[in-house]
Image (spheres, rainbow, N blue to C red):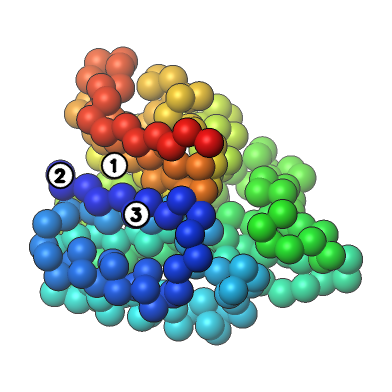
Amino acid sequence: MRIGLYHHIGSEESIDAIIDQFARALDADEFDLLVGPEYLFTNDGGLFEKAAKDGLVERLAELTLGKKAVLIPGTIVWGNPWEDFTIYANSAPLLYDGNVVGEVTKHSVRPADKTFANASMASYLIPEFHSEYLPSYFSERSFTIAGKRYLVEICDDHPFAINVMRTPLLSDIDVHVVVSNENNHHFTQPPDKLLLKEGGLFVECNGQHPSSYVGLLKGNTLVDLYVSALES
């Protein structure tokens, strides 16, 4: 599988510029999977309204029409202010051949008087999320595309969810994708915590402090295929 990872490294690129780079990568027909990092799409550092988010997803989906690659373009941040906090959703769409195959969402909260850049990245809206809501959480994050099974998680979803629950339904994944912002989950989660089949791929596309990674599961070991790191 040919994999392309979008290295964002905290630069201030316009949405049009980001979309243009994805379009050129898809037109080159050099990849089977393209993945962007968490928080790649923000509304000038803030939140999109839901209608604008949906429009952006459709715009990105159109890029994949007639192409062979699966596009997971990182996450789009959207939501609405509420009293002293902003409840925001952080969504990663799965796009293939012009269609929105699915959309994975992580919900978070932040104080309303802080900018998005200073937000706590893993403050969950529902305290009991990891127990009561975990079964539906998993069922909404696995998808079959062109004969391959994908599991997609967003940053800190990964260590919480993988450590809490394993199910036969999700024990035979071909490609396990984590889109993240700064945490290096391939370092912190041992291979036996993954839900991959033998020969499956673990793909992490990291953002502001990138340490992106691709590994192949062989026995109980992740064999490094690609490691990218940036020293601060």
Q: Residues within 10 Å of mark 1 (few under 14, many from 20)?
A: many
Q: Position of residue 31 (x, y in %)?
A: 16, 55
Residue positioned 53% across, 36% down in the render? 232
Residue type at the position of mark 1: Val
Question: Is 186 left or right of 213, judged from the image as shown?
Answer: right
Whether residue 141 appears in this view of the structure is: no
Q: Evaluate if marks 2 and 1 touch, with contact meaning CB atoms under 8 Å apart.
A: yes
- Element at label 1: strand
Q: Residue furthest front?
A: 232
Q: Amino acid at mark 3?
A: Tyr
What's the CA distance linking mark 1 and mark 3?
17 Å
In which quadrant of the rendered view does residue 170 lie? top left
Q: Which residue is mark 1?
A: 175
Q: Amino acid at mark 2?
A: Met
Quarter assignment of residue 81: bottom right
Q: Position of residue 38 (x, y in %)?
A: 49, 54
Mark 2 or 3: in front is 3
Q: Residue furthest left?
A: 29
Residue nearest the viewer, comparing 106 with 74: 74
Secondary structure state at the residue bearing disc 3: loop
Rendered residue at 73%/63% (across/down): 115
